[in-house]
Amino acid sequence: MKRSQPFNWLGWSSFALLLAAWELIAWETPKLLLYFPPVSRILAALGDALAAGTILQHGWVTLGRFAAGYLLSAGLAVTLGVLLGYFRYLHGLLATSIELLRPMPSVAIIPVAILLLGIGDGMIISVTVYASVWPILINSIDGVRRVDPTLIDTGRTFGLSSWQILRQIILPAASPYIVTGLRIGLSIALILVTTAEMIAGSKGLGFFILDEERAMNSANMYAGIVVVALLGYALNRLFLLLESRAMKWRHGMIVRQTA
Amino acid sequence: MAPRHDCAADGVMALRKFKGVGFLLMLLALWELAAQAEWINALIVPPPSKIFKLFFELVASGQIPMQILVSMKRALAGYLLAAAVFIPLGVFMGLSRTIYRLFEVIVEMLRPVPPPVVIPVALLFFGLGDEMKIFVIFFSCAWPILLNTIDGVRGVDWVLLNTARTFGLSRAKTVWQVILPACLPQILTGLRVSLPIMLILVVISEMVGSTDGIGYFVLDSQRRFRVAQMYAGMLALAILGYTLNQLFNLLQRLLLPWQRGRQLE
Amino acid sequence: MPILDVQALSKSYRQAGGDTTLAIGNITCQVEAGEFVSFVGPSGCGKTTLLMSIAGLLAPSSGRVVVNGKEVSGPPPNLVLLFQEYNKSLFAWRSVLGNVRFGLAARGARSAAAESKARKLIELVGLKGFESHYPWELSGGMQQRVAIARALAYEPEVLLMDEPFGSLDALTRLELEDALLRLWAELKTTILFITHDIEEAIYLSDRIWVLSRRPSQIMQELKIDFPRPRHQVTTRAEARFMELRNDIYRQIGNQEVP
């Protein structure tokens, strides 16, 4: 939703209409109350849970694991990606292994992680790191490799050292791709944290949502989903904010990527 | 006039692949040694020889293929359903500002929901059956397909649109003959991005709520401490992912024969 | 009656900041059927805007365009515009034959006769043998020929060409100039040509209008009466050719000096 455009009356109205319809259906058909608790009840449950602090506690746990996992994976993947992109020989060594390991859905690593690390923060953060590394790594390698040789030659003709070229030319030139990878990694990290919490957690929003579903507290379940959605939204906005600051020069040329 | 086939570059690529394969084999050999010599706990990380042997046995006995079939039936059902619904919706949203704004808020509200979080909702509605997984995959694959389709339709170059106008094409014909073919590559991009999402979600949904399927197989093996079997399942998943990618590339080459080379520069 | 009548045409744009720019000032001119006329002017003087307005793809801010007696309010049915960015205008998903057939189909010709007509046109532009090639496989000059063939397949009475040879190398340009003249002589279409290459305009046209800087106005109309068919060596060697060229060059160049 762009700020420069007029307020989207149509869109918000249709959304409000949808919520109103939901509310109506919920009240009119008590049988479906379980599946469609009225929006009002969901909001009430949300309010209660917030007040009792339960959701916030779970939220912090999830956020903490996410932050640890994502930042760690970003550091690892960007470093490794730049190295592999820059040193062709290294890339040549590892390319086949990467290509074979990549197609495996990263969530399949969860059982191994449970085996090695049990259930708990360590496991959850580890699988998050594993999964987020891939898109960041691949995009970083790609970005570095795609740097136009003309740019590099320009650096050389100005007498820059290899290290200077890497820092002043290659990294900035590759940064759009790296940023794309980081954005994809963000969603993946959130997905993995919530998944791991669902499969083998005792805390966190993922666990909370599943737990409430098992206890047939659908209103609480939806409330949890709303919180996760808000968290995801907030993280995305934060990312976009940081990105627009860092990538001001690119903003005229940006093509919207979707993941 | 077509670009010449670069045989020298091919040679270099082949050599590089050789190096990569060699390195991989070296790693596997190291792993084998480590497991056999008990440098690492072979109960948790068995030697690759054991894993491969078990893998082939499970494939031969049909157990792994059957689990894969079960998973793929659900996965493809959800994936194709999402394509059938969200490609047309994306086209309409791309063509008409009004329709776009109508759905914009709802889409932006649903998009940030991490797909696995939808699983409990699906469990609530559908229980443990196939429908649950199909619903989850349908929801998860929706956004890349929808957004890429919209982008593709909107991104059709104005020169193409004006070309259609200067040739006197009606609105309908312009959509059919110019806009849709022009945005087909982007639509396929959306479909390609959704493919790994489909795979990930079918595995997750099976791990959280299922009694069969390859995802359940892997988790169940871990719970029963059949460690080698767990790794064999993971190997199967890797091969499945790779195969799906190759099949998609083939499909793309069939649908877009005119893109075999570079784009028009 | 002239086939094309431009009456006091002007076009202004609203910029992002809010101010309006006047792209075309006040253009009035007539083109007779079968003529080959050119607009020459410095870059950025609004030539493309002018052509798009005549083609009915842009609505004029004031004045009007009359094609064959009918006022233009949208793309007229007997007129086709050939775009400067031909690579973005060709249909990447169709072969050369497919692209040319599109021009015929847009005209309403769909039968088996259409296929042979398309092939004849492809041969006419010198691309025989490349019918099943896709645009990406062709060089810039060849792509431009496909665009020309496609436009001619439409059998327009008036063909508008926006700097069609601008992005080609000099030798290809000369080749295509002659190819275009041959086609024009054979099909007897009316051609309105835009270029920044003064000599090209003189070589090709019956008449030239020299445009000023933005907002463009017609500074001068020149009649070019070298005999046809023209020849790259002999026509260009004539003394009068250089005189015309220098004349126009001074006209356009003069605008730099305050």
Image: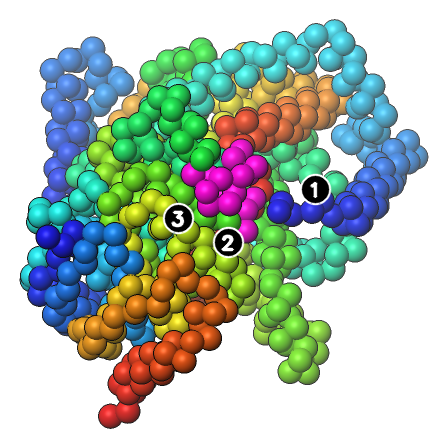
| Residue type marked 3 | Leu
Query: What SS does tag 3 mark?
Result: helix
Q: Which mark is residue A98?
A: 1
N-terminal-most mark, 2 or 3? 2
Q: Label 3: chain?
A: C
The answer to whether residue A65 is above or below residue A214 is below
**Image position, residue C109 (x, y; %):** 31, 27
What's the distance in space between the residues labelled 1 and 3, CA to CA? 57 Å
**Image position, residue C10 (x, y; %):** 12, 65
| Residue type marked 1 | Ile
Mark 3 residue crowding within 10 angstroms, few (<14) / some (14–19) / many (20+): some
| Residue type marked 2 | Gly
Query: What SS does tag 2 mark?
Result: helix
User: At 49% across and 62% down in the image, what residue appears?
Assistant: C174
User: At 24% across and 30% down in the image, what residue appears?
Assistant: B172
The answer to whether residue B228 is above or below residue C193 is above
Q: What range is drawn magenta here?
A: C121-139
Q: Label 2: chain?
A: C
Comparing labels 2 and 3, the label whose residue is closer to the camera: 3
Q: Would you identify the image quadrant in which residue B187 lies?
A: top left
What's the distance in space between the residues labelled 2 and 3, CA to CA? 19 Å
Q: Label 1: chain?
A: A
Mark 1 residue crowding within 10 angstroms, few (<14) / some (14–19) / many (20+): some
User: At 18% across and 44% down in the image, what residue appears?
Assistant: C76
Q: Nearer the viewer, residue A189 or C18?
A: C18
Per the image, the residue denoted by label 2 is C140
Q: Is residue C129 magenta?
A: yes
User: At 69% across and 74% down in the image, what residue appears?
Assistant: A163
Q: Is residue C183 magenta?
A: no
